[in-house]
């Protein structure tokens, strides 16, 4: 019997597995894919990840594909643009996730890659994970790090399924081009672009220029996602017209993927079970960014589980210390991001962009929070009070 069986080897699963192994526990990490594998993603995250997870620093050259220094935000009507300075790392997920996967193995984790976990059975004395092909694995605890369509969340009934209003359906493509072409279009600052509510629909579009690829994507909230392929084609045409994408772009690798964007689920623990990352809804509702949240949740989960195993108390009340830890670290981020999401998808968004265009401070606040470049939080109170101040300032100028 393993101490811990982790399902999913993405940023959440690989990180929690590594920390658990470093704490001396026997860990089995299962993923349906073999690594390296590509996760459809923008690949943008705060550079602070490298300070928080310092073991990644010596390998940063393997996955880092540039630093975006300026963010450009486009209003829904695409007439107003806000610009601010940011500090966002951009990576290729194939490389980034592979480094995390290898670091977990180096720490002593046993990987079972290319095998789907089908069922989880939790009993008083342990957990059984049934695998495709008929085999099974036993553990004292199971961690669901199995992403947005989490089987563990479903089986434990912590989240049977996301309502379509809580999911954003995306289409994303890593478009290859030359470094010179990228510098010409996006400058040395690797200006990233973020588009709110394209075509008046709730969602977002983005361009993350990297060293040799331009990552473009479009996400629409599930309730409005039926026209996603058509909208993506229109988005591509628009980008070409604006010279943001080469006329001859190879879009053959464009892929669809889901991300939860309505905040975390209420309960992220059960007896002998913890959920983290996308399976728990640890994703910014404003930007769809979840890499750093998954990794931070993973670190909390590892410490709580290690001490629970030492004390042989693996009930949900004991494991809820994990929930308290992530909530007090970044639970408030999600509340603010949800509020900001409401503001940015309201009929007044163009007007707010207009006000923002008159004030550099507003532009800094908004571009920082869209870029995942700070700690991911958006100070809505500061944004609202600044907006009111600019309104008064402008009114008295008239
Ligand atoms: C289009 C798109 C763009 C995004 N852009 C960004 C961005 O720029 N920045 C950012 O921070 N976040 C971004 N995100 C969100 C980010 O990808 C996720 O938040 C992050 O990957 C969460 O990590 P995770 O480990 O929880 O899940 P994942 O990375 O999804 O990993 C889950 C793993 O579980 C495995 N798995 C699933 N089910 C099973 C099973 N039954 N058995 C075995 N294995 C299983 C999968 O193969 C996968 O490897 C984006 C998401 C999408 C969809």
Image: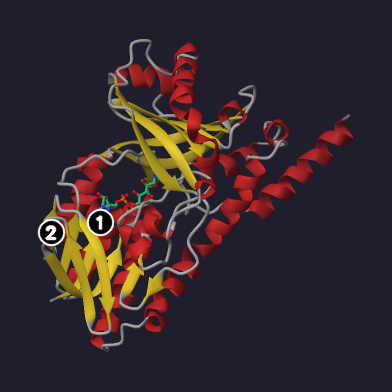
Q: Nearer the viewer, residue 129 or 55?
A: 129
Q: Count of labels shown?
A: 2
- Crowding near pointer 1: few (<14 within 10 Å), some, many (20+)? many
Decide if residue 31 is on the left or right side of residue 211: left
| Quarter occupied by residue 63 | top left
Residue 125 against residue 60 in the figure, above or below: below
Residue 215: x percent and y percent? 36, 30
Q: Is residue 290 left or right of residue 199?
A: left
Mark 2 closeness class: few <14, some 14–19, many ≥20 residues within 10 Å:
many
Give the number of the disc on residue 140.
none
- Residue shown at the point (80%, 39%) measured from the top left: 391
- Of helix, strand and loop, which one carries label 1? loop
What is the distance, in whole Å, between disc 1 and disc 2 at their CAs? 10 Å
Q: Is 352 displayed left or right of 393 in the figure?
A: left
Above or below: residue 158 compared with residue 126:
above
Q: Position of residue 355 (x, y in %)?
A: 73, 34
Q: Which residue was labeled with disc 2?
A: 111
Residue 8's mark?
A: 1
Dot 1 or dot 2, earlier in sequence: 1
Label 1 lies in ligand 1 vicinity (Cβ under 8 Å): yes
Query: Disc 2 on helix, strand or loop?
Result: strand
User: Is residue 63 in view?
Assistant: no
């Amino acid at each position: 019997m393993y101490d811990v069986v982790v399902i999913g080897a993405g940023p959440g699963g690989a990180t929690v597995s590594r920390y658990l192994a470093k704490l001396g526990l026997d860990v089995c990490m299962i993923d349906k894919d073999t690594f390296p594998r590509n996760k459809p993603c923008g690949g943008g995250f705060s550079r602070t990840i490298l300070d928080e997870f310092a073991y990644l620093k010596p390998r940063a050259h393997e996955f880092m594909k540039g630093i975006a220094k300026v963010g450009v935000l486009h209003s829904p009507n695409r007439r107003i643009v806000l610009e601010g300075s940011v500090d966002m790392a951009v990576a290729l997920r194939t490389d980034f996730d592979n480094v995390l996967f290898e670091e977990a193995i180096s720490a002593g984790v046993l990987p079972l890659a290319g095998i789907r976990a089908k069922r989880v059975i939790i009993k008083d004395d342990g957990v059984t994970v049934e695998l495709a092909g008929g085999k099974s694995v036993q553990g004292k605890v199971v961690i669901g790090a199995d992403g947005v369509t989490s089987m563990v969340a479903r089986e434990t009934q912590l989240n049977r399924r996301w309502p379509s209003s809580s999911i954003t359906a995306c289409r994303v493509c890593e478009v290859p081009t030359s470094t010179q072409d990228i510098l010409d279009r996006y400058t040395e600052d690797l200006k990233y672009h973020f588009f709110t509510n394209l075509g008046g629909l709730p969602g977002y579009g983005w361009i993350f220029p990297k060293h040799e690829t331009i990552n473009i994507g479009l996400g629409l909230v599930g309730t409005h996602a039926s026209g996603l392929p058509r909208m993506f084609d229109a988005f591509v045409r628009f980008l070409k017209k604006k010279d943001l994408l080469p006329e001859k772009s190879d879009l053959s690798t464009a892929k669809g993927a889901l991300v939860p964007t309505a905040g975390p689920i209420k309960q992220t623990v059960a007896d002998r079970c913890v959920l983290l990352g996308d399976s728990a809804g640890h994703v910014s509702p404003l930007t769809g960014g979840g890499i750093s949240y998954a990794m931070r949740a993973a670190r909390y989960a590892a410490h709580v589980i290690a001490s629970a195993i030492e004390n042989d108390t693996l009930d949900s009340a004991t494991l809820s210390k994990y929930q308290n830890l992530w909530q007090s670290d970044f639970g408030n981020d999600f509340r603010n991001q949800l509020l900001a999401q409401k503001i940015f998808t309201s009929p007044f968004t163009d007007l707010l962009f207009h006000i923002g265009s008159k004030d550099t401070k507003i532009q800094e606040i908004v571009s920082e929070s869209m870029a995942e470049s700070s700690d991911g939080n958006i100070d809505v109170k500061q944004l609202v009070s600044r907006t009111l101040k600019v309104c008064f300032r402008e009114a008295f100028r008239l």
